[in-house]
Amino acid sequence: MFRHRENEPSEFLQAGIESFGRNDIAAADAEMLALGLEATGHYGLPAPEISMGDIGLFSALVAALDLAAACVAVLIHEQHEHAQAASHDTSPWNRTDGWTLAGRRSRRLRFRHGAEQYDTVLWYGPDGFTMEFAGVDARLQFVPRDSGLFDMCLGDAPERASVAWSGRDLDVTTPRGHLKLQWIDPFAGKVADVAAAGRIVAPMPGTVTRILAEAGADLQRGAPLIVLEAMKMEHTLRAPSHGRLKALKCAVGDFVQEGTELADFEPVAD
């Protein structure tokens, strides 16, 4: 809103923001807020008064911490799975604390809360993790505790949180309360489509960086099988159902094309 004044400079008074056509509503709202603040500063109002009548916008501002807790919950969950798969193997290539020897790698973690979907990006580097979400780009550190508890720090914001899992659903408790989310594997559908035929295939071209299960192993639904690096991101292929890994048809270091058969999998009827 501008006030026009005759023979005087016009005055910037007020702005409203809204975003349309975006699935990641919280991220869109936060980005629009950042753009609005930048615009007000450009037009001479560096410290505007912000009035939020929409609770969804307020939620967007704290969502980065809540989503960081959800990401940590997934990482700890994977740590436990990888520890079981790797047994006593202490190779640095089995580390799950975000370390990578050189450069940076990324992976996308996607969550759903009701009708809303949230995408976060985790970067792996020599110094550990950083997380990107809704304009936040900060270092993410965590220490697992007992009984689902963990301490985490996003940037300079330390806090304690906890998680309870039910399949791919997680109930995260932070100092702000409870948040129920569903962890979405964007490749689960592609893998499941061919699993009925007894095959695990590569969902896209990439390099096999880790194998987390042995041939002949009996596996639960969701157990990690193979880690594939594609487009500078790591993707974990998981067992689409209860069953047995009959045979592996790939090795660490293999570059595979989309649709390449990576393993024989035998589903077991529930």
Image: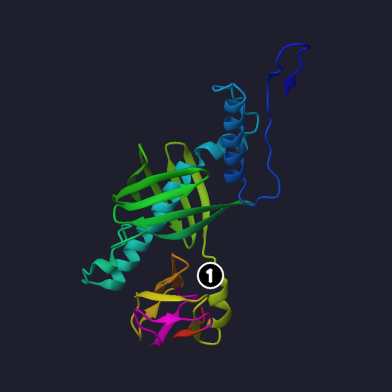
**With respect to residue 51, does 214 lie above or below?**
below
Q: Position of residue 245 (x, y in %)?
A: 41, 84
Looking at the rendered structure, the secondary structure element under dot 1 is: loop
Q: Position of residue 6 (x, y in %)?
A: 78, 12
Identify the residue at horizontal 57%, vertical 75% (top origin): 190
Identify the residue at horizontal 71%, vertical 17% (top origin): 10
Q: Quadrant of the N terminus?
A: top right
Give the magenta-colored segment's residue range: 238-259
Q: Which residue is mark 1?
A: 187
| Residue 92 position by quadrant | bottom left
Q: Seen in the image, is 257 located left or right of residue 78? A: right
Extreme residue in the right direction: 6
Of 6 and 78, nearer the camera is 6
Which kind of residue does numbered mark 1 sit on? Answer: Phe
**With respect to residue 229, does 6 lie above or below?**
above
Question: Residue 252 colored magenta?
Answer: yes
| Residue 226 position by quadrant | bottom left
**With respect to residue 27, does 52 lie above or below?**
above
Q: Position of residue 109 (x, y in %)?
A: 48, 58
Question: Residue 138 colored magenta?
Answer: no
Of 257 and 27, nearer the camera is 257
Identify the residue at horizontal 43%, vertical 59% (top origin): 106
Dot 1 surroundings within 10 Å: few (below 14), some, or many (20 or more)?
some
| Residue 192 position by quadrant | bottom right
Of 80 and 53, nearer the camera is 53
Q: Position of residue 235 (x, y in %)?
A: 45, 68
